[in-house]
Amino acid sequence: MTLILFLAGLALLIVGADLLVRGAARLSLSLGIAPLVVGLTVVAFGTSAPELAVSVKGALDGQTDIALGNVVGSNIFNVLFILGVSALLAPLVVDRQLIRQEVPIMIGLSLLVGWMAWDLRLSFPEGALLVALIAGYTLLLYLQGKRAPAAEVADEMLPTGPGWLSSLPGQLMLILVGLAMLVLGSGWLVDSAIVFATALGVSELVIGLTIVAAGTSLPEVATSIIAALRGEREIAVGNVLGSNIFNLGAVLGISAMVSGTGLTVPPALLAFDLPVMIAVAVAVLPVLFTGHLIARWEGAVFLAYYLAYTTYLVLYAQDHDALDEFSLVMRTVVIPLTAITLVVVVAREFRHRRRA
């Protein structure tokens, strides 16, 4: 029954997020908001609605490990797994704005959250600051959209639907139904995740970092992979970056504000998972910088790192004898080799541009 409840909650989250995106995007366009702004905010943020629902539910119920683990795990999953798989399917083209604006914002927010968590708590004022920053970011996109020429929103970003979607009542109904499904689905998902953690003898943090994080990121998975296969490869990258920014600003911020006493940060999260999230955000910059393209081999590296990260979490949860050896190999061999490779690739790109 717990597994059925988990799967049913996951299904409600995915369908609810899709309905919310459809209704909100159509409503925004009906109100005269620029399509570019809709694509970068409503649609990208809408795919993160499951993370928001689950983390807020966890914060309200005092399950802060799930609330935090869901955000940190989702951001790691989005970059390493989703971009990795998408790049393996088709090399990803990266828009210059994403390199100059969205990637630095994602890195800055990651560093800010890491600094805020240093005292093992995300307080109400810190949550309010994160929400204010995401509001400022949305305003920036709106102003940029007003200056930019009008553009069509791609089908993957603004799904089509029946004619009644063009009416205001129809759009509001979709939004309300989507929100209701998100609330119900998040409750089922969090409750079943707690049962899983108890039954498997692992912490709620590990469950949040793995099962819950991957589950709530399924809308991003679907959007990015479909976009990559259909040739809309910039959408695959923009969706991931936009969702990560929303997770750090709105999801963490709102969760810290509604929890009353703030979110207690587990020492294990501060010692390992938060640094991994920051490192993943920073590692995106040189990869995107090299020719504005994420090649297949870079996608393979991302995917391999996510598998290694998940393997570490499983070994850690089981207190496995191989944990120390695995950690040693990652620290002394794999990570240094990857860092050297990135430096060589960036240096080669610099030389190529200077000669050109």
Image (spheres, rainbow, N blue to C red):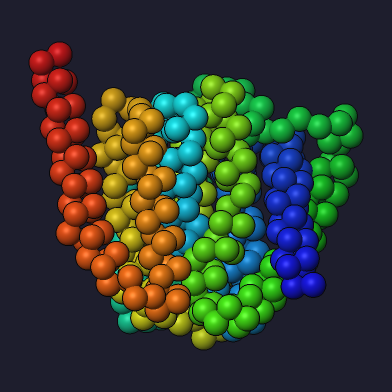
Residue 145 vertical placement versus 59 (above, below): above
Residue 217 vertical placement versus 53 (above, below): above
Residue 193 location, quadrant: bottom right
Question: Which residue is painted at 29% across and 64% down in the image?
Answer: 326
Residue 107 vertical placement versus 352 (above, below): below
**Image location of residue 201, percent across then percent down:** 55, 82
Front-most of 122 and 77? 77
User: Can residue 182 be seen from the camera position used here?
Assistant: no
**Image location of residue 152, percent across then percent down:** 61, 23
Question: Which residue is painted at 33% across and 71% down in the image?
Answer: 323
**Image location of residue 228, percent across then percent down:** 53, 29
Question: Which residue is painted at 15% across and 20% down in the image?
Answer: 352
Residue 333 location, quadrant: bottom left
Front-most of 45 and 303? 303
Where is the C terminus found, in terms of image quarters? top left
Task: Tell how many labels.
Answer: 0
Identify the residue at the far top of this view.
356
Left/right of residue 48 with respect to residue 171 in the rendered view? left
**Image location of residue 157, percent across then percent down:** 63, 34
Where is the N terminus found, in terms of image quarters? bottom right
Front-most of 115 and 185? 185
Left/right of residue 61 with respect to residue 182 in the rendered view? left
Residue 350 location, quadrant: top left
Question: Which residue is painted at 59% across and 64% down in the image?
Answer: 212
User: Can residue 159 be seen from the camera position used here?
Assistant: yes
